[in-house]
Image: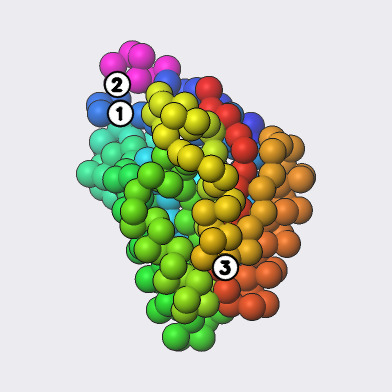
Amino acid sequence: MFFIRRFEESLLDLFAQGKLVGTTHTYIGQEANAVGIIDHLEPERDVIFSNHRCHGHYLAFTDDDFGLLCEVMGRAPGVCGGKGGSQHLCKGNFYSNGVLGSIVPVATGIALAEKKKGTGAVSTVFLGDGTLGEGVTYESLNMASLWKLPVFFVVENNHYAQSTPVELELAGSIPARAAAFGIETAELATTDVEEIHDAAGRAAARIRETSEPFFLVLDTYRY
């Protein structure tokens, strides 16, 4: 957690010095989520899908800080040869995409493929509260429930979609949205990594046991 925080603070320093191009969406404040959840995933088998705020997830899953730094700086030794930048990463079983909501159906499709192959893999997708304004998210929830797919939907509700407060963009309860599709849900309001780790462990075990989706909402905050 501390390493992710310091890494991203260094990115902000580089950005302020004009040494980074494009946007830099940091994960500062949400580090416990990535660490607590990804500890239950197997890098050689499970697949992770992230979003524009992907640095924390990437570091927790791969420990490849040099590759990430080079990628963000547009250097050739980067994860994607310096061409993907801050938001679009691909290494092993880790994928991220900066287009809001676009990675959710991909994660669902991979879960279908892995289930058909009988690998026992869990497809985990991290999304923010803003992604719940995208229709494709609900198509994915419907398919995951209908076809009983091993998708771990993790909503990091930091209460802002860029700069819009969540109460101005979403009506009703976030967990209720997934529950409406018959998906088991849980909600946690904490930044305690041990509490998150315990909740994620129960969710991951449930997915592996049943090969069905789980929807975990983490109330968090980014700085």
Q: Which of marks 1 and 2 is in front?
A: 1
For the view shown, which residue lies furthest in the front direction? 172
**Which residue type does callout 1 highlight?**
Thr
For the view shown, which residue lies furthest in the top direction? 17
Q: Which of marks 2 and 3 is nearer the N terminus?
A: 2
| Quarter residue 214 falls in | bottom right
- For mark 2, what is the residue? 19
Q: Can residue 152 be seen in this view?
A: no
For the point 52% across and 81% down, the residue is 119
Q: What percent of the width, then of the height, locates residue 49?
A: 43, 56
Residue range (magenta): 13-19
**Which residue type does callout 2 highlight?**
Lys
Q: Element type at marker 3? A: loop
User: In which quadrant of the rendered image does the N terminus lie?
Assistant: top right
Q: Tag 1: Cα neighbours inside 10 Å, few (<14), some, or many (≥20)?
A: few
For the point 29% across and 21% down, the residue is 19
**C-alpha distance separating marks 1 and 3:** 37 Å
Q: Element type at marker 1? A: loop
Q: Can residue 102 be seen in this view?
A: yes
**C-alpha distance separating marks 2 and 3:** 47 Å
Q: Tag 3: Cα neighbours inside 10 Å, few (<14), some, or many (≥20)?
A: some
For the view shown, which residue lies furthest in the left direction? 83
Q: Tag 2: Cα neighbours inside 10 Å, few (<14), some, or many (≥20)?
A: few
- For mark 3, what is the residue? 182
- Left or right: residue 49 versus residue 120 is left
Q: Which mark is residue 23?
A: 1
Front-most of 125 and 58? 125
For the point 52% across and 54% down, the residue is 177
Q: In this view, does 214 lie above or below 12?
A: below
